[in-house]
Amino acid sequence: MNNAVFRPKEATQVTETVIEAKGLDLTYQTNDGPVHALKGVDLTINKGDFVSFIGPSGCGKTTFLRTIADLEQPTGGKITVNGVSPEEARKARAYGYVFQAAGLFPWRTIGGNIRMPLEIMGYSRADQDERVKRVLELVHLDGFEKKFPWQLSGGMQQRASIARALSFDADILLMDEPFGALDEIVRDHLNEQLLELWARTNKTIGFVTHSIPEAVYLSTKIVVMSPRPGRITDVIDSPLPKERPLNIRDTPEFLEIAHRVREGLREGHAYDD
């Protein structure tokens, strides 16, 4: 008699590619001649990734994010978002975009600012109300719907901007240095809240930053870029757990990743004049 124990095979987790760039180039034509913003960028971002882009000013971090969002058009190579062109993804409302400044309309309340894209997209008033309520709770601004932007702190305004980007529930959230103008204490607090929001929504996030600690703290993957023409010099998959208290920044694992990012920036001549 065969006494072997047969066990079912473990299910293999399927990795879904959300954003893929292959040999991506982007050159601006200016009066002073061509400016090579991106060169030979190869990158894959999977569903649920939190990817930070870090590098010196002018290295193409924001340009790459804007290319994903169809705000810039590449001059070479290929990029797809959810398997289609960035233009098709934009028309399908595949992403929300958070800019460096909150960009709230001062004559609209916080609720009015958040519902603006919903109005443009033709959602019913009842659906707008439900979505505004939900995203305000997500970013811990419930109770502030009737306030105006000038009545909120800078950090709260940026949270309202994130709520607006989340209002139509796109699977991808693109964030262009959203906390760069805030003081360190507020920034740390918003970093914690952003990780909490990411865990609750399972969005795929692309995040531009100049801060090494911020990039390491937030990300599952850190993309280090060189000075112009922007190239990827290193892609670091973070071994840190998904739940990350702020004091994880004092651990050897965190410091080791930060050191690798710093070395990648140096090797890319990030500190050259």
Image (cartoon, rainbow, N blue to C red):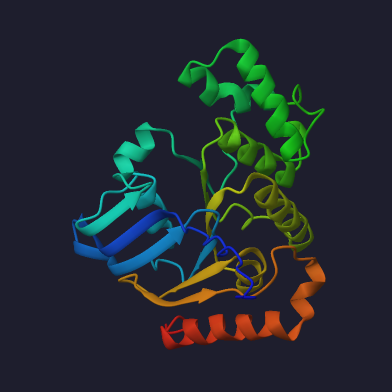
Instruction: Identify the residue at horizontal 72%, vertical 32% (top origin).
Output: 136
Horizontal relation, residue 36 to residue 142: left or right: left
Location of residue 227 (image quadrant): bottom left
**Residue 203 screen position, x and y as percent:** 57, 48
Horizontal relation, residue 187 to residue 1: left or right: right
Would you say residue 45 is visible in this rendering? yes
Instruction: Identify the residue at horizontal 65%, vertical 67% (top origin).
Output: 214
State the quadrant of the C terminus.
Answer: bottom left
Location of residue 19 (image quadrant): bottom left
Residue furthest top in the image:
125
**Residue 205 screen position, x and y as percent:** 54, 53
State the quadrant of the N terminus.
Answer: bottom right
**Residue 71 screen position, x and y as percent:** 35, 44
Would you say residue 109 is visible in this rendering? no
**On screen, 263 above or below 71?**
below
Residue furthest front in the image:
1
Instruction: Identify the residue at horizontal 77%, vertical 82% (top origin).
Output: 251
